[in-house]
Amino acid sequence: MKRQLKKLALFAMIVAMLVMIVACSQNADNTPANNDEQQSDNGQQNTEKQYKDTLVWAQGADITSLDPHQGKETTAVQVTDQIFDTLTVVNAKTGELEPQIAESWDQPNDTTYVFHIRKGIKFHDGSELTADDVKFSLDRAIASAAVSYIVDFIDTVTVIDNYTVEVKLDAPYAPALRNLSVPFSAIIPKAIVEKDVDAFIKNPIGSGPYKFVEWKQGDSATLEAFNDYYAGAPATNKLVMKVIPEAAQRTIALETGEIDLAYDIIPNDLAKIRNNPDLTLFEAPSLTCYYISMNTNKKPFDNEKVREAINIAIDRDLIIDTIASGSGEAADAIIAPAVYGYFSPGKYEYNPEKAKQLLAEAGYANGFETSIWVNDNQIRIEVCQAIQAMLQEVGIKAKVEVLEFGKFIADSSAGKHDMGYFGWVTSTTDADYTYYSLEHSSQKGAAGNRSFLNDPEVDKLIEKARTSTDESVRLKAYEDLSILLKEINNNAPIYYSTITAGASAKVEGFVMDPIGYHKLTNVKVAK
């Protein structure tokens, strides 16, 4: 009984305090005391929040091409993804596949999709988007040397009627719908492109939430809201992209209010933004894994015990805490947790003593000399130098060799490296994109498999996962594959990077995209 009375007394006290707080926050006219509130025409205060007409964001490099079937670099897509739409789309929040231009679809068999196009979708010139535009766009993407790998699973595209398209595959391909969500497979207006492709590239016309206005190369790009967008007008009337190559300068522009959003914050600036009450730091797990690839065609990397020793000699957490300033996650597989098909085979233990034992069992009790190749990127070089020091502790003398990016790619593709430090982003969000490229024996060298792994069981699991349309079969295959690859240890996954952006605290509705293709349709900035 006493306990109940105490609870009632406490409740009454809380209510009284709340009443007092509310009373104190009101002025004599019983209106909010905040002088920053807007006044309406009749003299009464209007508490509705006001928003800016323009949102300004900065990125580190300029657009490479406004043609979505050519400009596949992230800095291009960050702009063109506001202008164009695709048949399907991946929800950046949930990672789930959703309809976009295609309202729905059927799959009558393993190699056929029938897409039902939304009626009434308009391009920015006012013309209606139809099945002819879809066929034209997919055929054009297939023919593009820049982006064909995203859609080359397609055999034929056939128009059934104005709002129905049949897509036949050359073989069953489970990630087909996710590949069609990649911005490189954007739907463009057939009539306009056929009439004057050069004019289209300079003044792109899509069906997305924003219309193209202007591109000042090396400086900025301006977009304007498309009020007839099928999903409703976007939240902000105008978008301006500014090119600011220096990451530190992007942070300064954010601090001074010159921009509202800044992409790709460097580790050194993360704390600066976190500790600024006027700014917001956005961080999200990316789809990128950084890893050491060991050339299994060369000794001693043909020995599984050596490869395992290298994996457990690396202190991944220390690398993240120091070089990456805590921005990232220790990797246990070659694909990131946000990727469809990810399965954790268990974290790599950091165990230098066990690494020494494994080296001794493999016949390298006194260690050996080798090299780690890395391209000329400062953060990547620092990671390799840290790994170099860790390997030294177990008797492996690894020289860090820094190569210009083009030579790094060419020579590692030719298999001239011992070990190489690479980064790989799973752009389709589906595990096949990475596992097939990096682990399948048919993809050795330039295609991605720079460990030159040739394992029949690995190939079998990859092929099973990519050709099955049963999700449970695919996921089980990827689970088995993940476990097997950790036993093989041809690669040493180091860490999953964190994708970052800084924003004014007044920015609302911004959602990080794990690939970096941030959609700004629902973003607005309070005045």
Image: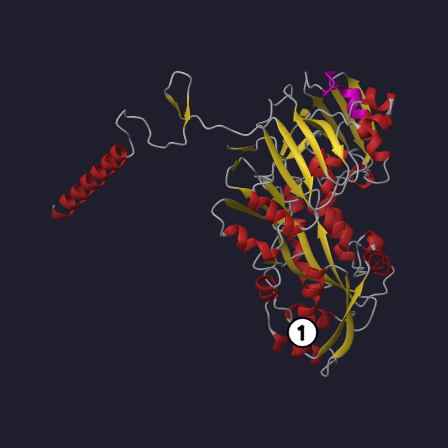
What amino acid is found at the position of numbered circle 1 in the picture? Ala
Q: In this view, does 137 lie above or below 260?
A: above
User: Looking at the image, which residue is at 63% across and 28% down?
Assistant: 238
Q: Which of 440 and 283 is in front in this view?
A: 283
Nearest the eye: 242 or 400 = 242
Counting labels gives 1
Would you say residue 337 is visible in this rendering?
yes
The image quadrant of residue 205 is: top right
Q: Main structural element of the magenta stretch: helix, strand or loop?
A: loop
Q: Is residue 37 left or right of residue 170?
A: left
What residue sits right under mark 1 in the picture?
Answer: 389
The span picked out in magenta is 123-135
Q: Please say whether residue 20 is one of the residues in the magenta stretch.
A: no
Image quadrant where residue 27 sits: top left
Residue 210 or residue 107, whichever sits in front? 210
Position of the N terminus by quadrant: top left
Taking 431 as reference, is 350 above or below it? below
Residue that appears at 20% across and 40% down:
11
Residue 115 in picture, x, y percent from top left:
72, 25
Q: Say which element carries label 1.
A: helix
- Name the image quarter holding residue 509: top right
Q: Which residue is drawn at 15% across and 44% down?
A: 4
Looking at the image, residue 112 sits to the left or right of residue 523; the answer is: right
Q: Does the magenta stretch include residue 130?
A: yes
Badge 1 local density, few (<14 within 10 Å), some, or many (20+)?
Answer: some
